[in-house]
Amino acid sequence: MLKYLNKKQVDFLNVSVIVVAAGSGRRFGYERNKLFYPLCGKPVLEHTLSRVFAARKVNEVILVISERDRREAEQLVFSLHPAVPVKFALGGAERGESVYNGLIETAGDCDVVMVHDGSRPWAGPEWYDNAAAVMEKAVAAIYAVPVKDTVKLCGTEEHYGPEQLKTLERSRLIAVQTPQIFRRKTLLAAYKYAKDNGIEATDDAALVEALGEDIVVLKGDERNRKVTTPDDIPVLEFYLNGPTKYCVGSGYDVHRLKEGRRLVLGGVAIPFEKGLDGHSDADVLTHAVMDALLGAAGLKDIGTYFPDTDKAFKGISSLHLLRKVKQLLVENGCRIINVDATLLAQRPKIRPYVPEMIQNIASVLEIGTADVSVKATTSEDLGFVGREEGMAAQAAAMILKYNAL
């Protein structure tokens, strides 16, 4: 049964928030956990956690994360300097298992448990404070918004093709959001009941429904959108930070060829009788990409950040420097859209190595390989390139730049 309740301020309840962040990037099309995908220049999870940490009525946070992502998650939490204790729980094969693993980590004196999707970064601290306020008399509460579209029930899981459809009464339908809020003992009882009776559900409120408990419905917001596909990112970026702008930058670099040096292009070591001379590995292609990105972001050139007088950069991989450039862009509220680079070299032929170069650059920049182009051309035996005295590279990059956060 769903029951509406007015908000009321209370202060004595101990509140634990479980943030479920143990998913992957498979549906999102990202090789990493989608919660580390940049949103307004910061990982999705950083937005989510910073809002939880800002809530006044939250006493502890349990972050459910996969073992693969734990170290990075710990570093992220540390950087946010939370004022409340943060525990870590291991994610399970299914969402319910992940939530339960977080639930058993909550403090013994915890009164109220809130379960929130790490992929919902918009919900502000008031969502937790207001929800805590209704739990003086309630055993469970959910945020929800009315369904605007007509919803039909399909007879098969395929959904497309000839169907016997049933139209549901839209005025009675709501779309549920998180956080979902429960008395701790109620949620524990719901999970035990579900296990004993073989019940599976896509959210925790459904398990409490199975107990026959009343659930308070709180007014949600359309902006509390879940990151499910890449299409959700620009919408959330607008909700979180208002208008953005696209910026384009260009980069150019040149290095002399020298015997006794290793030839590295796009992070790939290429067999050749000469290599490019420079303070780092002299990866001229990657250097051009770096300058294009810095230019698009309105930052200074690579020589400013990585001077050839600094011994720390002696012989360093340019991919490592590219990773530092990526971080500079994140810190300045930028998201990389695409990169297009061209190498000018008479020899050797680099076509066999291009896929690996693209993979290297895309991996470091955390964008898709389809968003990176690497090409090569000769200079028809003209100039220093034609005389094989050196190589040059030029690049263009597009970024999305946000207002100051």
Image (cartoon, helix red, strand yellow):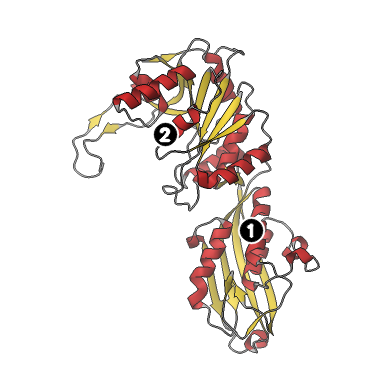
Q: Is residue 20 above or below residue 326?
A: above
| Residue 323's disc number | 1
Q: Is residue 352 above or below residue 184?
A: below
Percent x, y of residue 142: 45, 22
Mark 2 is on which residue type? Glu
Q: Secondary structure at mark 1?
A: helix
Locate residue 240 relative to residue 212 in the image: left or right. right
Residue closer to the observer: 106 or 25:
106
Q: Quadrant of the C terminus?
A: top right
Percent x, y of residue 250: 65, 65
| Residue 97's disc number | 2
Locate residue 197 relative to residue 24 in the image: left or right. left
Residue closer to the observer: 310 or 190:
190
Q: Quadrant of the N terminus?
A: top left
Q: Quick one: which residue is furthest to the right in this view?
A: 309
Q: Secondary structure at mark 2?
A: helix
**Residue sitting at x 78%, y 69%:** 308
Locate residue 319 relative to residue 200 in the image: left or right. right
For disc 2, the neighbor class at 10 Å (few under 14, some 14 to 19, many from 20) is some
Residue 3 lies in quadrant: top left
Percent x, y of residue 325: 67, 58
**Residue sitting at x 68%, y 59%:** 294
**Residue sitting at x 69%, y 35%:** 81
For disc 1, the neighbor class at 10 Å (few under 14, some 14 to 19, many from 20) is some
